[in-house]
Image (tube, grey):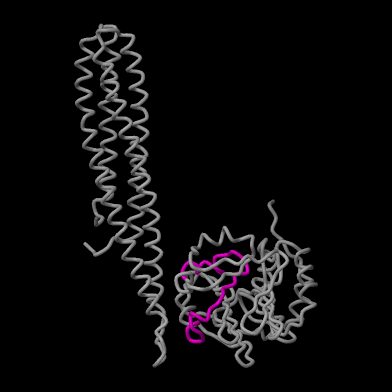
Amino acid sequence: MKAISIFQKGSHQWLCFGRDPDKPEKIIDTNQYMVTNGESSIILDPGGVELFSQMLTSVLRYTTLDNIKALFSSHQDPDIISSLGLWDQCLKNSKLYSPWLWESFIRHFGMSNIEFEAIPDEGSEIQLGNIVLQFVPAHYLHSSGNMHVYDKEAKILMSGDVGAALDEVSAPFYVEDFEAHIPKMEYFHRRWMPSNKAKEEWINRVRKLDIEIIAPQHGGIFKNDMVGKFLDWFERLDVGIATNK
Amino acid sequence: MSESNDAADTFISVAHVASELFKAQSIAEELSITSKNARALAVRAGSTAAGFNEITRFIEGLSKLTIDAARSVNTIAISQTKIASDLFRSQSFVSKLDKVDYEPVKGHVNELAPIYDEVNQARSQLERKIRISLRELVDRLDETKMELRATQVVSVVSRVEASRAHEDFQNSLNSVADKVSSAGQRINSHLERARRHLAHLRT
């Protein structure tokens, strides 16, 4: 599994783990993020059970298990958090932040050491070392209880499945050509995202934030002018295309 | 045979045992109805079938014994499955941990060593619990099987008592004896199958 630093200022760092060349073939490639400030780290969408060994390998290169104070799962999907039962056996004093809606579902992955911290529908905040991370509501994008993470200092929005693209494992970490990137994310957004209303609310909320990086859970990361291009494109996109005919 | 049982294999085997016992329980419930019908029949047959009345109590006892055994095996099986699935999780965890490419920096603590210690300790405890619970399960099955041998005796005695009854009731009473015999055999075969599912596991 590869790792890149997408933000670094003193002891405040964002790492992205992904593009795993050893991942089983039919498993979707995922981006896992770790935010560290001082001696505190949080892993955002730590990933599925199949990637656990690679993730733990990667994480231990940058921090200690004692320093992992929290996990965050944007929603309940297996590619997001099915590794929970394994992390649960490594982390003794850690918390899992996730939308309250999913607690009784997520516990099916196994959780006896980690403490569940329910994020209310309106979102909340967490202190990580000297910084504050905000949990920003993104309900119905795509999950009915969905949160994103915003770091005001780093100006990064971890956007879960919003901005996700189904790309090659060999693809670069950052989106370089927006037009060429559209086909990799268009169907995903039109099919997975069920509600134009939810999409519009999210765009209005996110446009008020100062963002330099949008970091999705699959595919390329949007940086600088790509952020605006993505928001404009997503705003125009008609989502929720599936019919039952 | 390996040192410890494979957790997935254990909970699959135990689930099979519970399923066999569930089938045995259904037959025992039928036997209970047969016993009640036989008692009504014995009352109608009057003094010539008085001995049969006693037998029905015994059949009822056998039926209760099987139902109780099935329930207790089921309770053991549920807890066994829970322990086995915990063991399965910890075995999977260790196999994932084995794949972690980690070399502690010289002079630093080995981050994974205490996790290995803890999970191995938990594994040993779970394996011990499983062995105790399996032993308990096997003993319960063997005990029930022994007690059910009486069904064949009951069936023979029922036939003797039927032959003493008024001829109007003989066929019905013989049919009760047949049902007891058949139920006993069927329950027994489920117990044997259940026992076979456990045969390869270390207790």
Q: Residue at (31%, 26%) from the top-left corner?
A: B60
Is residue A87 positioned above or below A152 on the image?
Answer: above
Direction from residue A153 to residue A20 in the image, left or right: left
Whether A101 is drawn above or below A52: the answer is: above
A160 sits left or right of B33 in the view: right
Q: Is residue A63 left or right of residue A236?
A: left
Look at the picture and state if B79 lies above or below B162: below
**For this rendering, which residue is in front, A17 or B151?**
B151
Relative vertical location of residue A37 with respect to residue B54 in this rendering, above or below: below
Residue B194 on image: x %, y % = 29, 44
Queried whether the magenta region covers residue A183, the answer comes back as no
* Quadrant that contains the N terminus of chain B: bottom left
Image-quadrant location for residue B151: top left
Please tell me which residue is depicted at 37% across the width and 79% down the height of the picture.
B113
Who is closer to the viewer here, A180 or A217? A217
- What is the quadrant of the C terminus of chain B in the image? bottom left
Percent x, y of residue A4: 57, 87
In this rendering, position of residue A185 left or right of residue B106: right
Percent x, y for residue A221?
65, 81
Q: Give the range drawn in magenta.
A: A59-86
Residue that appears at 26% across and 20% down? B55
